[in-house]
Amino acid sequence: EPEVTQTPSHQVTQMGQEVILRCVPISNHLYFYWYRQILGQKVEFLVSFYNNEISEKSEIFDDQFSVERPDGSNFTLKIRSTKLEDSAMYFCASRPGLTGNTIYFGEGSWLTVV
Amino acid sequence: AQSVTQLDSQVPVFEEAPVELRCNYSSSVSVYLFWYVQYPNQGLQLLLKYLSGSTLVKGINGFEAEFNKSQTSFHLRKPSVHISDTAEYFCAVSEAAGNKLTFGGGTRVLVKP
């Protein structure tokens, strides 16, 4: 069964450093997402991406965050200058179409900012 | 905007006993409802979803959920759990015409032998 793959599975970075989290969504899916889960808290929506542009973003997704689909297969989340509070599990997800279709999640990238 | 409340953060249950995980939502528009499961060290996997039609929805691994519009609930049930059902379960909602999922806080199920 096709799946969303994410790398790295775990990354430790120093505060202020840039981090790029990578995702390969399921082939032929059209919508792409990043969610995050801070330890002990809810899974939160960050951003959705469709037709090579951001279609929706949350208040969390401020100027330090950016997304890109550089080559038609990868979907990346960049955090420009990491803060301690960015430590979380980041989930990439994709969806074939819009209404009613299942969103498929990757296994997550655990980011620890020290 | 919608929100989801999972009333139980942890549910211990003995093997072969039934389990019910409660989920309530609020929304001013029509919604779709989902249950996802996260096994230890794995990603989020869809258990089942309600889009329309029959309010009783059957999913994978013997789980089912019932949509109750008047009570704005979507409780998840399994008549007999296995050790392998130990996981965290997330209820989620999306607007029928919407784009993203809003998650509840999760319920950690620990199945004891």
Image (cartoon, coloured by chain):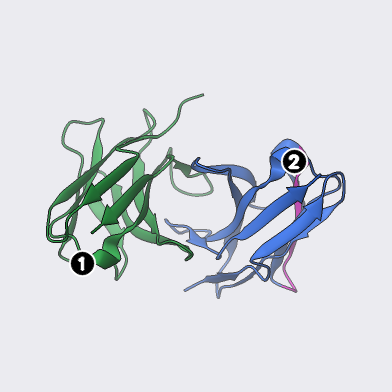
Chain colours: A green, B blue
Subunit that carries the residue with mark 2: B
**Callout 1 secondary element:** loop
Q: Is residue A98 left or right of residue A83?
A: right
Residue ID for mark 1? A62
Q: Residue at x 43, y 57 (%)?
A: B100
Q: Which mark is residue A112?
A: none
Q: Residue at x 52, y 62 (%)?
A: B103
User: Is A40 located above or below residue A9 in the figure?
Assistant: below
**Callout 2 secondary element:** helix
Subunit that carries the residue with mark 1: A
Gap in Å between the C-alphas at discs 1 and 2?
A: 42 Å
Quarter-of-image position of residue A94: top left
- Residue A27 placement (x, y as % from top left): 36, 28
Badge 2, how many Cα within 10 Å: few under 14, some, many 20+? some
Q: Are marks 1 and 2 in contact (CB under 8 Å)?
A: no
From where the camera sits, is residue A61 visible? no
Quarter-of-image position of residue B28: bottom right
Q: Which mark is residue B83?
A: 2
Location of the C terminus of chain B by quadrant is: top right
Quarter-of-image position of residue A51: top left
Q: Nearer the viewer, residue A32 or A23?
A: A23
User: Is B89 located above or below residue A107 in the figure?
Assistant: below
Decide whether residue B113 is among the magenta residues. Answer: no
Q: Nearer the viewer, residue A10 or A70?
A: A10
Q: Is residue B66 left or right of residue A113?
A: right
Q: In the image, what residue type sits under mark 2?
A: Ile
Residue span colored magenta: B62-71
